[in-house]
Amino acid sequence: DIAALKHLYGIREIYNSSDNTYSFKNEASLSLIHDLGGYDTIDLSGSSANNDIKTFQIDLGGGAFYQAGNKTMIWEDDYQTGAVYTTSFDTKIEKFIGSNGIDNVRLGPTSDTIITNGGDDTIASVGIYKSPQSIRVDAGSGGDSVYVFIETGEVNSFLDINGGSGYDYLRIFTSETDIDLTIYMQHFDNFENFAFYDSKPQTITVDTEDFIKLNTSYIGIVADDEDTVILPEGAVLD
């Protein structure tokens, strides 16, 4: 409806332009978020429900339609859904605070802070819209997966991307063909499993010091058949 009204009458670009926080309500509700400015937050920390009914259920981009909670959206007189959110195409959400359950979240064009608390969370599209150096990610506890689009030149001390506690998975999309795992372990905090994706064969080099840094569990490396993994002397590939 908002898109149709915009087409007919235009849009008031300063509408709802202050800093706003939209909090989860643990009850059946339907909320429309139409927010055109300020620094805005979606906060689901009041919920322990799993937000994983579908892939990337929590979409922080404009024009999103999602449900916070673990009830299927069925419109019947005898069925109550969880909290249902829709966002207009022009809505800008900068910060997301997740539930204490599972959160599947995808960043939007202006998103710069993602905190997912407990649960085995999935955080996607880091680096799609803006440099990963300008995005803070704290995946909290649980076995989390974070998908990052980055080039080696951006992997430095300016990054603030943390897998948190648990056995966490870092999924890197890069055009680099020679990967030094040490650099990624230095600047991405608390990740134990690493995967590198590109259309070309990649060479991934693992040094002895990488094993020293991770002395409480195994290093996991995911590689395609055409990729080469170089291990230090004495290391065992399981």
Image (cartoon, rainbow, N blue to C red):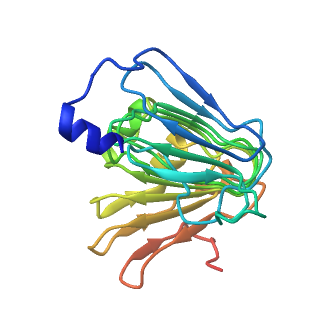
Task: Kindly give the residue lying farthest to the front in the view shown.
Answer: 77
Relative vertical location of residue 112 with respect to residue 232 in this rendering, above or below: above
Q: Position of residue 130 (x, y in %)?
A: 32, 38
Visible in this render: residue 25?
yes
Point 44% across, 50% down: residue:
64
64 vs 80, nearest the viewer = 80
Front-most of 60 and 141?
60
Specify whether 70 is left or right of 145.
right
| Quarter of image, res 211 | bottom right
Residue farthest toward the bottom in the current orientation of the protein: 225
Q: Quadrant of the C terminus?
A: bottom right
Which residue does the image show at 40% across and 45% down from the upper left?
A: 61
In the visual, does 201 lie left or right of 143?
left
- Give whichever of 49, 66 is nearer the camera: 66
Q: Residue at x 56, y 45 (%)?
A: 85
Q: Position of residue 2 (x, y in %)?
A: 34, 40
Q: Position of residue 123 (x, y in %)?
A: 54, 51
Residue visible at 27% across and 73% down in the picture? 199
- Residue 209 in sight: no
Which quarter of the image is occupied by the N terminus?
top left
Vertical order, 233 against 186 (above or below): below
Q: Position of residue 237 (x, y in %)?
A: 61, 78
